[in-house]
Image: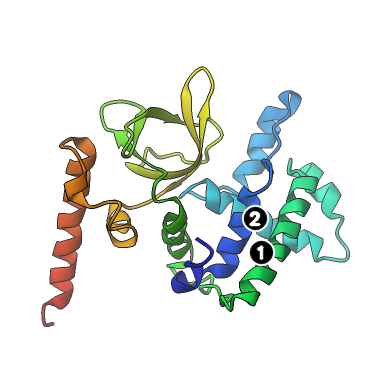
Amino acid sequence: MLISSPEFYCSNEILSITSLLSVPQIFMRPANARKRADEMKAQFAHPDGDHLTLLNAYHAFKGQANDSDSDARAWCHQHFLNFRHLSSADSVRAQLKRIMETHNLELMSTPFEDKNYYTNIRRCLLTGFFMQVALRNPSAKVYYTVKDNQAVRLHPSTVLKVDHDWVLYHEFVLTSQQYIRTCTYIKPEWLLEIAPVYYDLDSFEPGEVRSALVRAATKKKRREDLRRQPR
């Protein structure tokens, strides 16, 4: 994911997200203040998912940490963010940044005002997590992991409010039920573009996943054909 990130013009952001995924959960939800904690987390929530929510929280934390007039630790306490875990992520980020610079991987960002800022990040996430994708069963509040066909639900901690058909996930959590945690909405045509060998249609048994990928491939081809037509 880090190696591919310059191709998607988001290596700075992927560096941050990778670091945040390398430390324990940064959002705190104490039993005696769950409602308040959820309200604070909602301030950072991104409609497309949890990876971008982590990034938003980290950017806000760095804004506080770089402000000489601000007490970042107190700010984290107020916003139910774990100061120690965020500081650890910052340290991991600095180490990974040095490794990227050693290997001449360019550090760059899509301009924040560009409509593709968050889209580029979501697409790049797939270069590392293309095997950790789930498809929603349209007739139930359940998802099925692609390839191994495990029935899972979105973890209650997710910020996703819409039942998107396709999601990428970071963790598979087994409690009384099977959950996927830290999820981001993706588009199926991205799978065909970014991991064409893994998502080779001939390698899928007939079923909902293959049918959905065939529909995505048809839609993608139609769009490409339209682009080729003379204006």
Residue 94 percent across, percent down from the top left: 72, 65
Query: Quick check: 31 left or right of 195?
Result: right
* Crowding near the residue tagged with mark 2, few <14, some 14–19, many ≥20 C-alpha atoms within 10 Å: many
Q: Please report the residue visible at 32 percent of the width from the left and 35 percent of the height from the top.
A: 136
* Crowding near the residue tagged with mark 1, few <14, some 14–19, many ≥20 C-alpha atoms within 10 Å: some
Query: Quick check: 201 left or right of 151?
Result: left
Residue 64 percent across, percent down from the top left: 78, 60
Q: Please report the residue visible at 65 percent of the width from the left and 76 percent of the height from the top.
A: 102
Q: Quadrant of the C terminus?
A: bottom left
Q: Are marks 2 and 1 in contact (CB under 8 Å)?
A: yes
Residue indicated by mark 1: 96
Classify 70 as above or below 44.
below
Q: Which type of secondary structure does the marked residue at label 1 adopt?
A: helix
Residue indicated by mark 2: 19
Q: CA distance from mark 2 to mark 1?
A: 8 Å
Query: Quick check: 142 left or right of 226?
Result: right
Q: Please report the residue visible at 76 percent of the width from the left and 52 percent of the height from the top.
A: 88
- Residue type, numbered disc 1: Leu
Residue 118 percent across, percent down from the top left: 48, 61
Q: Say which label, 2 or 1, has the lower sequence index.
A: 2
